[in-house]
Amino acid sequence: MSTARHFASPAEALGYALTLYQNGRPAECGAVCRAILAIKPDHHDASFLLGVAAFTLGQIEDAQHHLAVTIVLKPDLADASFNLALLLRRRGRLAEAAALQGRALRLVPGQTDAGPITTLGGMFRELGRIAAARAVLRRAVAQAPDDAEAWRESGHALRDGGAPGAAAVAYDRAYRLDPSRTESLGDRLHASLSQCDWSAYDALCREVLSVIDSGRGIALPLLTLLIDTSPAQQDRAARHFHSAVVKPAAIPQAAAAVPATAALGAPSGDGGRLTVAYLSADFHEHATAYLAAELFELHDRDRFRVVACSYGPDDSSPTRRRLEAAFDAFHDIRGCDAEQVRAMLVAEGVHILVDLKGYTRHVRFDLLARRLAPVQVAYLGYPGTMGGDAMDYVIGDRFVTPPEHQPHYRERLVIMPDSYQVNDRRRPLDARAPDRAACGLPPDGFVFCAFNAPFKITPSLFGLWMRVLARVPGSVLWLQQPGRDGADNLRREAARRGVDPDRLVFAPHRPQAEHLARYRLADLFLDSFPYTGHTTVSDALWMGVPVVTRIGGTFASRVAAGLLNAAGLPETVTTSFDGYEALAAQLAGDPATLAAYRRRLEAARTTAPLFDSPRFTRHLERAYRTMWDRHAAGLPPTSFTVLPL
């Protein structure tokens, strides 16, 4: 046997190959393993090591093949199943990965390391098998009660199972066991906010801000939007997160033989047709879909071809069926890894990829970590910077992304002329309004509504709302149902502030048409802060309900202000909590002004830029054309303002 030297036996050759691998020489290791297999094709150890070396080299198909062959050669080699499960998980093939992980665990019934058990629990959670995940993770924490990762993954499963209180306890345990895993702080704070538990709010906020400012760990980007942070702090957190979490999520890839642009037949600035792909996990009954459905339908097919890349569930809903019909091609990419997605985009001739997800739930970091198309754009799903260089542009407007905020974005800012947010004119409007009693509202009295997600409510904001209720006798505050514990917490907080808890009314989840119809019973919408309303504010304005908001200094804290300006109601934008409180109380006592605002909003459905979907689509197409023309000319991305029609 010979590669670069002679060996007395396959065993000696294998030992040398292992030494090569351990010394960071996987290519030479692989060559020795291939030589062993040429003489002894059923040598399972050589096949296994070759699979590991191939993975390290980015030869993913080879790695998968050799690990699978190893399992055939030696079915009881647990490490082969563990490694193949890891590879398949990173490729997005979760069901196969979980089956292999479970098989490997059965091969080592005396497994003392909780890591593989925790991994299986995480796979079940990602598959949506929450009950199975919780059962497996209970075993993990019972077996290793000092394992921080087991507790954190347990927190995720409890959160996804609708138990935020228990999740907060698990996250707290994870952080105490391993304070270097600072992301557990953000998990804990978000879980507490989700059930309106503010007992540790101030301390947790201080710790998260300290993490950001010191650079000593990871602060979850979405969480930074929910607390009092500056654009610079959000940028710093996002950059660190991208470097520490997103980049490592990419599977190592061998050098591509064909460049991504080779198959495009790309148009230049001569008006050729552009292919735009939209990437999301939310092509179903979801706020993003409710906003953007008509955009996909309205694209000018003479100048644009639109493709969907969906890695979320197919809920078989009317929204899903509408979206499938809206695109020229609709690809369900669940189970596809990043290279398979990239190959599909090349085959489709995609010029511009638009990510609608950002750092929100169910995002696939392996797709965000690499360039899948020549031009990549962040839009709609996440109100902030991604902190990496994969996205060339972010779509904003003069309110949410004023030009002076460019230093806080890795992406180049694209300033839309009216609003960055698209809206759907087919949003349900004519569903019959329920009566007040059916919604738990009193027969009379002023109704403030605040239908933003419960995790957007901060203690200071809730205190403001309670002061408003105290100033408007007989009024009630109508909130989104935060779960039983959350509702109890809010009632307790109201009583602590001297307000009768019965003046809080909770609205359970309803289908979109029924939910929108409820707005007809509301007199005034009170916005959240610092993460202001997005779809919820557009819904309120569409239904003719005036909104009081406060404009802040970050993208997320400026969205509602931009929407109100685009709807023609800038008068209800305030710049401080004092101004917000005063305006809310004033409007509650001024029915004539409120009625005038309602009439203005009802007219706005057909006249205001916020609801002019064709106008928005033409503006966005201008932006796409500008991006592509720069790329085709060999110019780098640059910030620009879209000229209005």
Image: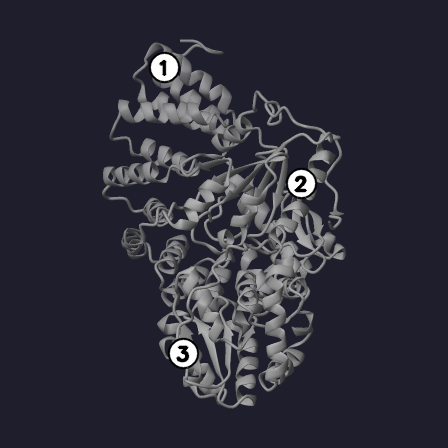
Report the disc number at residue 367. Answer: none
Q: Closer to the camera: disc 2 or disc 3?
A: 3
C-beta proximity under 8 Å, tags 2 and 3: no
Horizontal and vertical percent for residue 239? 62, 50
Q: CA distance from mark 2 to mark 3?
A: 46 Å
Q: Is residue 352 above or below residue 497?
A: above
- Identified at 39% across, 54% down, the residue is 153
- Identified at 51% across, 32% down, the residue is 252
Mark 2 or mark 3, which has the lower sequence index?
3
Q: CA distance from mark 3 to mark 1?
A: 76 Å
Label 3 belongs to which residue?
436
User: For this view, does 49 lie left or right of residue 242?
Assistant: left
Going by the numbered disc 2, the residue's amino acid type is: Tyr
Going by the numbered disc 1, the residue's amino acid type is: Leu
Point out the image quarter for the N terminus.
top left
User: For this view, does 272 lie left or right of residue 469?
Assistant: right
- In the structure shown, which secondary structural element does the residue marked by tag 3 occupy? loop
Label 1 belongs to which residue?
37
- Identified at 48% across, 89% down, the residue is 474
Report the disc number at residue 624. Answer: 2
Going by the numbered disc 3, the residue's amino acid type is: Arg
Q: Is residue 480 above or below residue 74?
A: below
User: For this view, does 590 lie left or right of residue 336?
Assistant: right
Q: CA distance from mark 1 to mark 2?
A: 52 Å
| Residue placed most toward the observer, 295 or 536 | 295
